[in-house]
Image (cartoon, rainbow, N blue to C red):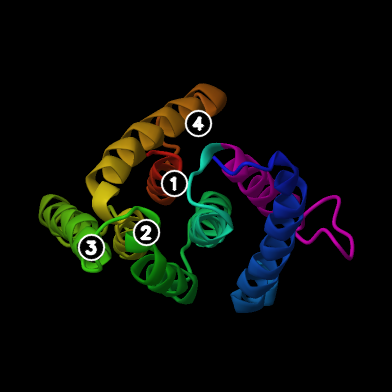
Amino acid sequence: MLATAWIALPAALAGFGLGWVSAWFTEWLMPADEVPGIRWRSGLVRDPVVQGALALIWAVMPLTLDGGVLRLIEGGLLAVPLVQVAITDLRTRYVYTVVGLIGLGLGLALGWQFHGGPWWSGIAGALACGGVFVVLYLLGRLVYRGGEPMARGDITIAAMVGAGAATLALNALFYGVLAGGVLALAVWLTTRSRHTTMPYGPGLCLGGLITLFLH
């Protein structure tokens, strides 16, 4: 744990600012007619959900992590695409490949170091989690006779999560499946409709976020 809890406030501000940049970039990628109408928007608040979630994560990390400020920055940067992808997928049912690839790149660059594994553990995690979803995607195509019950973007998300989780990639996948089930149940209880679909992305990203706090 960082010895100085006072760093939580500037860390929260850093997370809030990175959330603004992430939300702006994601909206820049969106067609004009798909940009969500977000309440409470102002000059400093582009997406209160993304910015609030990242501010909270960055504020909590100094109280839970060992390894100093550098490890806080690594973990905080890994959290940015996880939060953005989860919320975008939940809102629009769409994953922007560029955002996923940025997250994958951050995971490969920082995940192994953050989790204290060998340099290749991020690559192995990306291949393992992405590979699982490739198999599920192909099986789905067979079962549904050429249909796509799973979006190909979910494969990118799985690889991104696995790269960032590195040595904890299978843990992230396990927690992601559990989180996805809980979210799906919550959506079903809210809508009371069996025809309501729940994207895989939010659950997977939650699994990745959980591993940021595992030691």
Q: Is residue 160 visible to the viewer in this orientation of the structure?
A: no
Look at discs 3 and 4 and give the one toward the viewer.
Answer: 3
CA gap, disc 1 to disc 4?
26 Å
Chain-order first, disc 1 or disc 3: 3
Q: Residue at x 35, y 53 (%)?
A: 115
Asked if the residues shown at circle 1 and circle 2 are in contact, with their CB atoms under 8 angstroms apart, the answer is: yes
Question: Residue 21 vs residue 157: left or right?
Answer: right
- Which quarter shows the N terminus? top right
Neighbour class for label 4 at 10 Å: few (<14), some, many (≥20)?
some
Q: Residue at x 50, y 61 (%)?
A: 74
Question: Residue 31 vs residue 215: left or right?
Answer: right
Give amino acid for label 3. Pro
- According to the image, label 1 marks what residue? 212
Q: Secondary structure at mark 1?
A: loop
Tell me residue 177's x, y (percent): 31, 38
Asked if the residues shown at circle 3 and circle 4 are in contact, with their CB atoms under 8 angstroms apart, the answer is: no
Chain-order first, disc 1 or disc 4: 4
Q: Above or below — where is 187 with respect to 118?
A: above
Say which quarter of the image contains residue 69.
bottom right
- According to the image, label 4 marks what residue? 187
- According to the image, label 2 marks what residue? 164
Asked if the residues shown at circle 1 and circle 4 are in contact, with their CB atoms under 8 angstroms apart, the answer is: no
- Which quarter shows the C terminus? top left
- According to the image, label 3 marks what residue? 118
